[in-house]
């Protein structure tokens, strides 16, 4: 793409079930922006363990780290389950560090789509914003928030996750992301509510385009995600952003809502959501969190096993589990 300046990467963060994938898929319709279909999850892990690769000025060490990073489960899936070999000219690299390796990998896949700006939509990078901006000082962080009760519902339906652990994580994640985001300022960090985005999509997508320093493209109002409702004539039907909020009111019992609000009612109220019972801010005891976490991991693994039936099924599940464990090593601390 000639005469188009490459900008820093875009990171969409937020609690799982907040619309990170939806927003990434919409921005992916922009002619300049590329988001992989899946979450990478592992960038902070490599930042934490970078010392084990030694001096990256050594071509062998650099190649070893590039091979490891570029063959995480996301990139293997994007490459038809085949080993990824990212081309590069070691002698002419501007930097020989982790950020260069990450950029090489994402840019390789972006170039296959004729895109020049790449992004990542791993939700829980919300708790690692300082790590992300240390790697990429020019990065733009979009934090999408959603009613924590709807997030818990989304995670329960899709992956059979414990609703109390989900809303506990939601509360802590939002608090940390907001504190770290405030340190970055409005040029690098932007928070948008899922409910606002889906009720006034064009207004907020125009605001996001301005934040990213890119021209607004009407294509970003549409998505290929299956949960989007089709609008338009049968000859020109597209999937567009639609409201999808408040379903927790019909799904959860009053007792379940009361317990969730005892944990995160205060954060719900601070985020502009109506609280039915209590503006609580209670923690969950450690032994319960430990039990919930391992039960959630088993449940999500079974869901993945049921849903993915293609080539290299076992290898894919093992790589997803490995990435999730790497993510847990920094998120669950």
Image: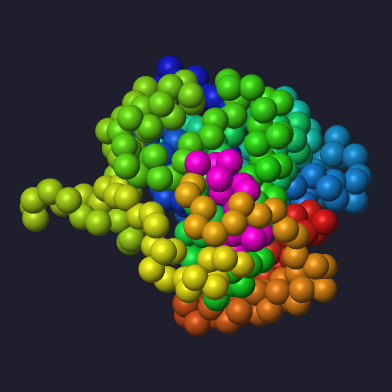
Viewer-nearest residue: 278 or 205: 278
The reply, left or right, for residue 215 in relation to residue 118 is: left
x and y percentages locating residue 86 in the rendered image: 62, 47
Residue 189 in view (yes/no): yes
Task: Give the quarter of the figure containing the C terminus.
Answer: bottom right
Q: At x 70% / y 74%, what residue is drawn?
A: 292
Image coords of residue 54 (percent x, y):
91, 45
Question: What colour scheme has been applied to the protein in the rendered image?
Answer: rainbow
Q: Name which residue lies at 61% across and 47% down.
A: 267
Regarding residue 144, the answer to whether it shows in the image is: no
State the image coordinates of residue 34 (x, y, percent, origin top left). Answer: 47, 41
In depth, the one of 319 and 150 nearer the eye is: 150
**Image coords of residue 160 (percent x, y):** 55, 75
Residue lying at 66% horizontally and 59% vertically, measured from the top left: 263
Image: 260 above or below 264: below
Magenta region, residue range: 260-272
Foreground residue, 220 or 89? 220
- The relative height of residue 216 versus residue 21 in the rendered view (above or below) is above
Specify whether residue 239 is painted magenta. Answer: no
User: Residue at the front extreme?
Assistant: 277
């Amino acid at each position: 793409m000639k005469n188009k300046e490459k900008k820093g990467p875009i990171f969409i963060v937020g609690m799982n079930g907040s619309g990170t994938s939806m927003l990434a898929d919409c921005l992916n319709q922009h002619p300049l922006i590329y988001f992989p279909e899946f979450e990478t999850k592992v960038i902070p892990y490599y930042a934490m363990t970078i010392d084990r690769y030694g001096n990256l000025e050594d071509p062998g060490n650099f190649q070893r780290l590039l091979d490891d990073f570029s063959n995480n489960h996301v990139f293997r899936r994007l490459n038809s389950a085949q080993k990824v070999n990212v081309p590069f000219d070691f002698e002419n690299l501007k930097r020989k560090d982790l950020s260069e390796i990450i950029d090489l990998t994402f840019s390789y896949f972006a170039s296959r789509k004729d895109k020049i700006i790449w992004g990542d939509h791993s939700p829980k990078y919300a708790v690692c914003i300082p790590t992300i901006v240390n790697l990429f000082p020019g990065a733009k962080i979009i934090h999408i928030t959603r009613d924590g009760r709807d997030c818990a519902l989304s995670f329960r339906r899709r992956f059979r996750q414990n609703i109390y652990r989900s809303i506990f994580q939601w509360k802590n994640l939002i608090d940390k992301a907001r504190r770290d985001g405030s340190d970055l300022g409005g040029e690098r960090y932007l928070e948008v509510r899922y409910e606002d985005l889906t009720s006034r999509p064009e207004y907020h997508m125009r605001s996001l385009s301005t934040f990213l320093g890119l021209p607004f493209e009407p294509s970003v109002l549409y998505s290929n995600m299956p949960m989007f409702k089709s609008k338009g004539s049968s000859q020109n039907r597209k999937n567009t952003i639609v409201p999808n909020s408040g379903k927790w009111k019909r799904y959860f019992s009053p007792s379940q809502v009361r317990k969730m609000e005892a944990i995160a009612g205060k954060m719900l109220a601070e985020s502009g959501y109506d609280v039915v019972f209590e503006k609580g801010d209670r923690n969950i005891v450690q032994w319960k969190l430990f039990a919930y976490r391992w039960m959630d991991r088993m449940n999500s693994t079974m869901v993945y096993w049921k849903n993915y039936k293609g080539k290299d099924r076992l290898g894919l599940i093992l790589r997803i589990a490995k990435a999730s464990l790497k993510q847990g090593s920094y998120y669950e601390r």
